[in-house]
Amino acid sequence: MAASKALFSLSFLLCSLPAIISQSFIRIPSDRSVVDNDIYCESWRLSVETNNSGKWSLVPSSCASYVEKYMNGDKFLSDSEVAFDNMLAYAATVEVGSDGKDAWIFDVDETLISNLPYYKLYGEATLLPVSLRFYKKLQQLGFTIILLTGRTESQRTVTVQNLLKTGYSHWSRLILRNTTEKNDTALVFKSRRRAELAKEGYKLHGCSGDQWSDLVGYPMAKRIFKVPNPLYYLS
Amino acid sequence: MAASKALFSLSFLLCSLPAIISQSFIRIPSDRSVVDNDIYCESWRLSVETNNSGKWSLVPSSCASYVEKYMNGDKFLSDSEVAFDNMLAYAATVEVGSDGKDAWIFDVDETLISNLPYYKLYGEATLLPVSLRFYKKLQQLGFTIILLTGRTESQRTVTVQNLLKTGYSHWSRLILRNTTEKNDTALVFKSRRRAELAKEGYKLHGCSGDQWSDLVGYPMAKRIFKVPNPLYYLS
């Protein structure tokens, strides 16, 4: 069964990040010529962000403190800012018509809002002002905003509350998993829903998500944008 | 007209890297909260490697010395090693049959061999032992190796010489642009050739390239792997 992000976030509430990452494992190739651990962990993070790594389950234990430093320091914020700047640079080139069919798709958790207890421990998510600023600029540009999340319909009310509380509003549609979709991977579920949107005549200009399963699969948006997340992977 | 890598490499021979990168420009968003230049340049490099940046022309001038340090230090080597480790981890899971149809596609320049004068100035490309090791392991696993490069048919002999000289051999096919394809983008050319391979019955398990135009476009290999290259972008 595919774990939904919401379920993940819920279970995550029961444990702290250091506990999660210290349980993890790593395959260190024996013929590795670079031994500096931070350099290796940066390469590991790159492999995750490019999806070279494919499916992965846990942050390598040797990278636990690196990831903690990355999330708490300036790097995560800088990476997020550049990612959202990339989105805006592209969005500004799109000719948006008046028929409401020029769409941008957002994932919710760890893309627009952050539910990780990590942030509760260390302060407000640094991602929020950056993503909220872009969201509002997209609205000014006339895009139709569609939220496509792996959360289930049973979480609709709380999801709307989460979004409004953090400053998001006036989306055109909030798509959640219905009961027949709860066993689908995020990739299958999200691709199916994008196909439905395309069929309705939406032009899928951009898609933003912290998971590759938010972004790839047919049909894909014309441009996809990976929001940094070195903490977990969802298929 | 689409610039081929070979043409690029040729023109690159006429100038040194510092000259290339010092001509470049950068848009620094006015509302950026992170000001450390190396942190920004790391984020810029991530945006390139994830393809969030889309098409880009020149290394930002403020990142010239960062990129030089990156290429000359341990980071490029480490990133390359992890990328090829990712490939091997996946390749080892593929059930390779005896019909010769289980294929892996490689780009050539800056994926298998490096022609940049940069390397001539600073010593042998660090990428080579890493990529050559993976290439040989793929052969041991029984994969059919297909080389798909933006170089033209007129460069076949020199390309074969380049490859053999650096240790590559026994590929199944070396696909170059024919004369009717010279104005195609790499994306269009490479997608068309992958479609032909799929039609011939090849299973496109993996595809490795330093450019996103080596990797995306229909049909895509089942798994795609981005080899690091913060020096240039080809459509």
Image (spheres, coloured by chain):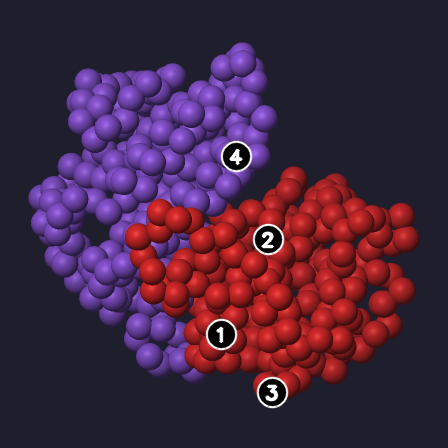
Chain colours: A red, B purple
Closer to the camera in the image, B12 or B101: B101
Q: Depth-wise, is mark 2 or mark 4 nearer the camera?
A: 4
Instruction: Give the SS element for disc 4.
Output: loop
Subunit that carries the residue with mark 4: B
x and y percentages locating residue A187 in the rendered image: 69, 47
Q: What residue lies at 23% left-to-right and 40% top-to-bottom?
A: B114
What distance separates the C-alpha of mark 1 from that of mark 4?
30 Å
Q: Name the element at disc 2.
A: loop
Label 4 close to label 3 by CB (< 8 Å): no
Q: Which residue is labeled 3 in the image?
A: A123
Q: Amino acid at mark 3?
A: Gly
Relative horizontal placement of residue B71, taking residue B170 as reference (left or right): left
Mark 2 and mark 3 in contact? Answer it, CB < 8 Å.
no
Q: Disc 2 or 1, which lies upstream in sequence? A: 2
Q: Position of residue A146 (x, y in %)?
A: 71, 60
User: Which residue is denoted by mark 2 in the rendering?
Assistant: A56
User: According to the image, label 1 marks what residue?
Assistant: A65
Q: Is residue A187 above or below residue A131?
A: above
Above or below: residue A13 compared with residue B119: below
Q: Answer few, some or many: residues within 10 Å of disc 2's Cα (few below 14, many 20 plus, some between 14 and 19).
A: few
Q: Earlier in the sequence, mark 1 or mark 3?
A: 1
Q: Which residue was labeled with disc 4?
A: B92
Separation of residues labelled 2 and 1 (CA atoms): 18 Å
Instruction: Determine which quarter of the picture holds residue A132.
Output: bottom right
3D distance between C-alphas at marks 2 and 3: 27 Å
Q: Is residue A3 left or right of residue B198?
A: right
What amino acid is found at the position of numbered circle 1 in the picture? Answer: Ser
